[in-house]
Amino acid sequence: MNEFTISSERIERYLKLTENALAKVEILFPEDSEKNEMANRILEMVRSYHSDAIFFLKEGRGDDAFAAINYAHGWLDAGVRLELLDGKGDWKLFTLP
């Protein structure tokens, strides 16, 4: 079995990418709507996985940090693709619909 190591620089780059995407994205629906609630659930998952990634990185668990930050960004992409979140046309940060 091969051993793979992900550099902390690469993990930090993905953390920053996801932070930038999270700062840019907006919910497309009014606060009292069901779709707004769905979008907020997605953002909650993004923040949770992002927080997990930071925790894992501090604990020296780079593989887990890398997995968590990729899950976080995947949730963002899903929200944008489902048109619950507005990625503002930024194809560098999001997989656009």
Image (cartoon, helix red, strand yellow):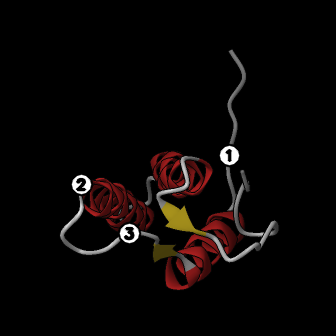
Dot 2: element: helix
Seen at 50% across and 54% down, the residue is 79
Q: Position of residue 35 (x, y in %)?
A: 32, 55
Q: Residues within 10 Å of mark 1 (few under 14, many from 20)?
A: few
Q: Position of residue 14 (x, y in %)?
A: 65, 66
Residue type of the residue flagged with mark 3: Phe
Estimate the spatial distance between the alpha carbons at disc 3 and disc 2, rounded to whole Å.
9 Å
Q: Residues within 10 Å of mark 2 (few under 14, many from 20)?
A: few
Residue type of the residue flagged with mark 2: Glu
Q: Confirm or deny contact between disc 3 and disc 2 (CB under 8 A).
A: no
Q: Confirm or deny contact between disc 1 and disc 3 (CB under 8 A).
A: no
Seen at 54% across and 76% down, the residue is 25
Residue 26 to residue 79: above or below: below
Dot 1: element: loop
The residue that label 2 is drawn on is: 34
Q: Please indicate whether residue 35 sits to the left or right of residue 95 in the image.
A: left
- Mark 3 or mark 2: whose residue is earlier in sequence: 3
Residue type of the residue flagged with mark 1: Thr
Q: Residues within 10 Å of mark 3 (few under 14, many from 20)?
A: some
Q: Please indicate whether residue 17 sits to the left or right of residue 19 in the image.
A: right
Seen at 30% across and 53% down, the residue is 38
Residue 46 to residue 5: above or below: below
Residue 8's quadrant in the figure?
bottom right
The residue that label 1 is drawn on is: 5
Quarter placement of the N terminus: top right
